[in-house]
Amino acid sequence: MLHLRKVLGAKPKEHVEVELAQMMTPWGEALDIEHVLEEHPDPQFARTSFCTLNGSWDCTFAESGHDAAGDLLPVVRQAPIPNAGAFDQQIVVPFSPEAPLSGINRQLKPDELLWYRRSFQTPSLQNDERALLHFQAVDYACAVYVNGQFVGAHAGGYTPFCFDVTNALADAASANELLVCVADSSEAGSHPRGKQRFDRGDIWYTAQSGIWQSVWLETVPDAHISSITLEADPESGIVSLGAKLVCPEGEPIPALALEVFDENDHLIASDRWIPDESTCALAAHIENARLWSPDDPYLYRLRITFGRDVVASYCGFRTVKTYRDAQGRMRVLLNGKPLFIRGVLDQAYWSDGLMTAPADDALVFDIEAMRKAGFNLMRKHIKLEAARWYYHCDRLGMLVLQDMVSGGDTEIRTWQWSYKPTLFKISWNHYRDDTDRHREELGAGSAAFRQEWASLCCETIRLLGNHPCIIGWSLFNEGWGQFDAVAMTRMVREQDPTRLIDATSGWYDQGCGDFYSVHNYFRDMKVWRDGARHSLGARGDKAQKRAFFVSEFGGFTHRVDGHAALDEAYGYEPYDDRDEWRQAVHTLLKSMDALEPDGLAGYVFTQVSDIEEETNGILTYDRRVNKLE
């Protein structure tokens, strides 16, 4: 039954531009701008020769005159470099200019450019060494210069990239000037952007831009490893390594070696080969491999060497799949044992850093708070997180369902994305997403957007596929920019057959993927029959049904005075009294647990923290109050 009173209470209000209260998290309050996020940004691909470039940079805003809806790469590439005197502000990297911790607290507009500048010392390089400049994420398009020399450009707000800057460096131990030019159209352009909007309010949040994850410099030998893929197979006990290699033409190719160490740092397996091309695969066998699970998040340390290049990494052994139980209900198996998913939605915004956590310990805090609350999975919602968050999930034993980043055209399609599916449940299983008209209605009418989404999807899997914590990929959420879910599911399955797929989280199900995945904020809780016209199931077999999964529910709101960004609060069922809110949450979670015998495979509760107008989090936006405690 649909509860209309709840629906009407949750109807989005007209967005009014009201300034957010300035709230600092404990880590933001203690931030030392001389020591900002100094940990190695990528523990799965770490060298000792890295130097962080986070901290205070100079910056300036400039008019661009470009078309916000167009291609931004030529804009940043062709923009004239400002004169030195124009850099009259300081920004704390890697916080976006919209975030309080940046020291700027100002929106980059679609017709503007943001220029960054800082100096750094030339690292000590041998004749056979190179310097690589890494950016973990810049939103959205950027061009990079070292000492006035263009070294590279990149488009895409969520993925890392690096440039070889060796030939642009000054003499040893001299200072170098690093310049970065950024443009970001946010919802003025058709790109994957997540929940960012200039017109923020209710479920949409402050648009951010620019450098928002770590920047670092590292030195490598001429012959070095550029990337790795790992697969740990529990059945065979084999760790498979795929490596992409860089080796100067005409020089001897050194050996590639893989070493595996246990928790006592004992070498337990290895493999070695001299490659004859730019890619190479190794395999090391481990006797009686210890499995990774939330109860025992066991990781093997890896050392990968290619000549003089040494990379530290790790891996974990685990399997995940669906199966049919004795009652004919589809369930989830982790390492061959039944797993009931108790998940929580993690949008990962911070009151002082926006999409950037103010400290590494802040990432750990959220994970540990959710484990303590009884959750075994976090659904990373429409965002790619810093690599260290996945590392902490790996080592702490938190399962992850990873969303792809949504986007689409510039319009919020409230009827198609919200009102129609909320009022008419029948639409969930009777609305195709592979026709031109329906793609347009869902905000995915642009062929360029669809191509960019598919490219980012594949890059996300390549980027995060080594993490044992990630047990599934969630492709589309509530129809935002949804298109061709059947084809996209096949694409993802071909690239990664080892994980589960939640093809359409919410509604507009196309009968594909491993889950019949629904959002239920306004109806009675029960296990629904898979209502797809047909079900392609886990392997593409029409006869196989899928596991029933409530991928969002809850959203009960309680605003804590002194810890809320706005006087107005948004959520799906308001509670003024915290004890009443807490009791309602506990009662709802227990009722969901009680549905497991009826066929419920798992759920995702909304959500980890309050965010701006939303006050439906377990934690307040500033992370100072846990409402469940």
Image (tube, rainbow, N blue to C red):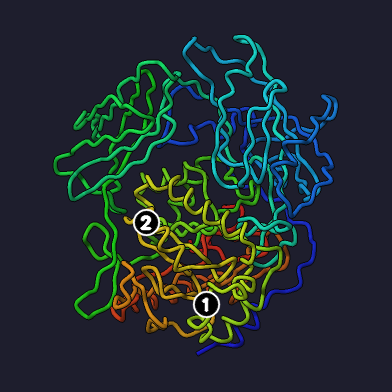
Across and down, in percent, residue 392 comes to: 42, 44
Q: Secondary structure at mark 2?
A: helix
Residue in view at x 56 percent, y 15 percent: 123
Tell me the number on the disc at residue 494: 2
Across and down, in percent, residue 442 comes to: 61, 71
Query: From what the image shows, is residue 24 above or below residue 283?
Result: below
Residue in view at x 26 percent, y 47 percent: 317
Across and down, in percent, residue 99 comes to: 69, 46
* Left or right: where 439 falls relative to 463: right
* Left or right: where 195 falls relative to 88: left
Residue in view at x 59 percent, y 65 percent: 481
Query: From what the image shows, is residue 533 above or below residue 285?
Result: below
Query: From what the image shows, is residue 561 above or below residue 179?
Result: below
- Rendered image quadrant of residue 174: top right
Across and down, in percent, residue 159 comes to: 54, 44
Tell me the number on the disc at residue 571: none
Q: Amino acid at mark 2?
A: Glu
10 Å neighbourhood of mark 2: few (<14), some, or many (≥20)?
few
**Mark 1 highlights which residue?**
432
10 Å neighbourhood of mark 1: few (<14), some, or many (≥20)?
some
Give the CA separation, mark 2 to mark 1: 23 Å
Residue in view at x 27 percent, y 45 percent: 232
Q: Residue furthest bottom?
A: 1
Q: Is residue 625 visible?
A: no
Q: Amino acid at mark 1?
A: Arg
* Left or right: where 458 falls relative to 266: right
Q: How many marks?
A: 2
First of labels 2, 1 by sequence position: 1
Q: Secondary structure at mark 1?
A: loop
